[in-house]
Image (tube, rainbow, N blue to C red):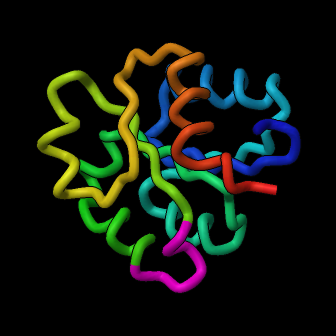
Amino acid sequence: MGQESKILIIDNGGTPIETLDGLLKDYGFIIRSSDADYGLEDARTFLPDVIIVDVSVTSKNKSLCAELRLNEDTKDIPILVLCTDEEPMRMRSATDAVSYVMDPFAMMHLFKEMNSNFLMSVN
């Protein structure tokens, strides 16, 4: 994991996501950030290994994850949703995400989720 793995972060902006972006770059990931309006298009052009979506995006654009799953270019890209402790069970049926990480998140937990669910098949 790491070196040369591409991650797309889709969010509505804010300090926690900017911090995540910087930390992941420090670990050698290639990062692109997007917002709810351009997330699908950015996923199709960037073709990341993992898509991290902030739960606020799924609240604004409920169909984003479904659109990612229906698109031929992005249907197999794993989606990880950052959410609060009350949201995973409610969101599971609505998002098609493979995994959820509670926000505020611990970097080691995020890496563990990415390793076990997503990046083990990369490279």
Q: Give the magenta part as a residue range.
A: 70-76
Residue reaching furthest to the bottom: 72
| Relative side of 71 to 67, left or right | right
* Residue 7 covered by magenta stretch: no
62 displayed left or right of 44:
left
Q: Position of residue 88 (x, y in %)?
A: 22, 37
Against 79, residue 115 (above or below) is above
* Residue 74 lies within the magenta run: yes
Side of 19 where 92 appears, left or right: left
| Total number of numbered discs in the rendering | 0
Query: Residue sitting at 81 percent across and 23 percent down?
Result: 26
Q: Which quadrant is the C terminus positioned in?
A: bottom right
Please, what is the dominant secondary structure of the magenta stretch?
loop
Q: Nearer the viewer, residue 95 or 62?
A: 95
Q: Residue at x 85, y 32 (%)?
A: 28
What x and y, as percent, mark residue 73? 60, 80
- How far across and how far down the image is residue 54, in percent? 40, 39
Q: Residue at x 69, y 72 (%)?
A: 45
Q: Quadrant of residue 87?
A: top left
Q: Which residue is nearer to you in this view: 30 or 118?
A: 118
Q: Quadrant of the N terminus?
A: top right
In the image, residue 89 above or below residue 83: below
The part of the image, by quadrant, that contains residue 116 is top right
The correct choice, above or below, for 86 with respect to 118 in the image is above
Towards the viewer: 32 or 91 = 91
Q: Residue at x 30, y 51 (%)?
A: 58
